[in-house]
Image (spheres, coloured by chain):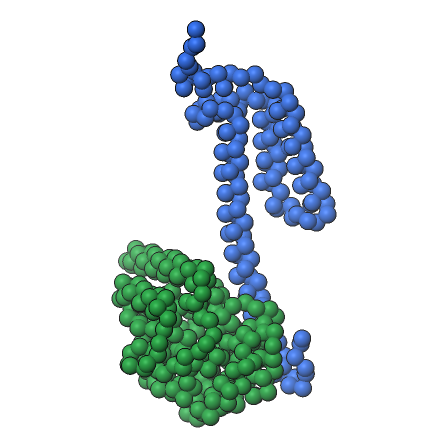
Chain colours: A blue, B green
Amino acid sequence: MNETLTPEQLREVFLAAADPGSARVLALTCSLLLVSVVLWLVYRRGLREEYTPIWMGVALALVLVSVRLDWLYVLTRAIGAWTASSLIFFLGEIFLVVICLNYAVRLSRTGVQIKNLAQEVALLRARLERLDPGQQPLR
Amino acid sequence: MSHLEPGLERAVLIIPAYNEAASLGDVLARVAAADSGCEVVVVDDGSLDDTGKIAARSGATVLRHPFNLGYGAALQTGYKYALELNAALVVQMDADGQHDPAQIRELTAGIRSGNYDLVVGSRFLETSGYRMSPLRSIGRKLFSALARLADLRVSDPTSGFQGMNRRVLDLYARDFFPTDYPDVDVLLTAFRHGLRVGEHPVRMAQTSRASTLHGGLRSVYYVYKMLLSTVSATARATRRAEEQEADRP
């Protein structure tokens, strides 16, 4: 009587699994929470406005996914994943890699700017001391 | 200690120093005794000890970084200062006492005569008895080999005892210059920019201080970083050459 499922059939079972309403609620809550935290950080000047689009984009994507869960299943089928959750993890990892790389680029640029500023301070300080040799070093 | 050599354009000696209070006084006394004809500039790279005070007391010009930026950044501050002064010649040496200021004139002779833009003081052109740890020795040979691949022959690519003219300063003041370890990668960049790079044999004292090629992960990072920057410098130079070739009528 035991029927053995092929991997393809098993995959279909996973994909056809009931769509739990709790997952939608969780995704919606997370997206609203994310939007709230971003807005709060902007309000408290902890996050500059130009850094917000990517986080608002993530929040919007979460809202879309929770409202139209069927789109997520379509995408899951399209890329050959077995479950929607594995697709979400995969996309999340890609997002984290991209955002880390983006921040590394920004940090590199900022590092050069800070170095140039510090060098400028050293040169200006030396010029000041040349103009007024009696002055104590500025530290 | 600051003066101009009669009959010659302005020359600057750059000594980057970070927490070198123990050795700097002696180094500056030897520099004064050597009468190199250079204006002495000590770049105090955010030292926590009396490095800056010792340098100022000796009469050197002191450029003080507000915080520690790294050996390469300290050198570059010196280059920028030399550019401000319109210096025609710059010599750089370390503050730990391993370089001999008495050799500054012979090191820079090739630049003064117009044969070279940049001269690296080498421990290995002549038998000097200088001993390196096996790891450092492997690193030096690896970087020399990398440079040879690009047709640049340098036997001591990690030497901090160098002389250069204004053309090199103009290049080294740019943002590509590394803040940490400017070694074979910047020599290659200079070479690829058409600057004439030469070597001169020098004596160097053994120092007990840990170098970039000593000690665990730091040395691994150093080799990795140097390989990456060397490859990227070569790739950029190749691309620039191709673009110049394409722009030709």
Give the tally of numbered discs.
Answer: 0
Q: x, y (%) of residue A21? A: 63, 20
Instruction: Using the image as rendered, state which of residue B219 and residue A28 is in the foreground.
Output: B219
Q: Residue at horizontal 73%, vertical 47%?
A: A44
Q: Quadrant of the C terminus of chain A?
A: bottom right
Please report the residue visible at 53 percent of the width from the left and 36 percent of the height from the top: A92
* Residue lying at 37% horizontally and 71% vertically, measured from the top left: B133
| Position of residue B202 in the picture relative to residue B42 (left or right) | left
- Report x, y in % for residue B86: 48, 80
Nearer to the camera, A18 or B170: A18
How far across and how far down the image is residue A124, in percent?
60, 74
Residue at position x 38%, y 81% from top?
Answer: B204
Q: Is residue B213 above or below residue A7?
A: below
Q: Quadrant of residue B48?
A: bottom right
For residue A66, which quarter of the picture? top right
* Horizontal and vertical percent position of residue B207: 44, 78
Please determine whether, in this image, residue B110 is positioned above or below residue B65: below
Residue A1 picture quarter: top left
| One can see residue B218 in this view | yes
In this view, the residue in front, B112 or B95, is B95
User: What is the residue that sits farthest to the front in this orientation?
Assistant: A1
Q: Is residue A20 above or below residue B72?
A: above
Residue B61 in sight from this viewpoint: no
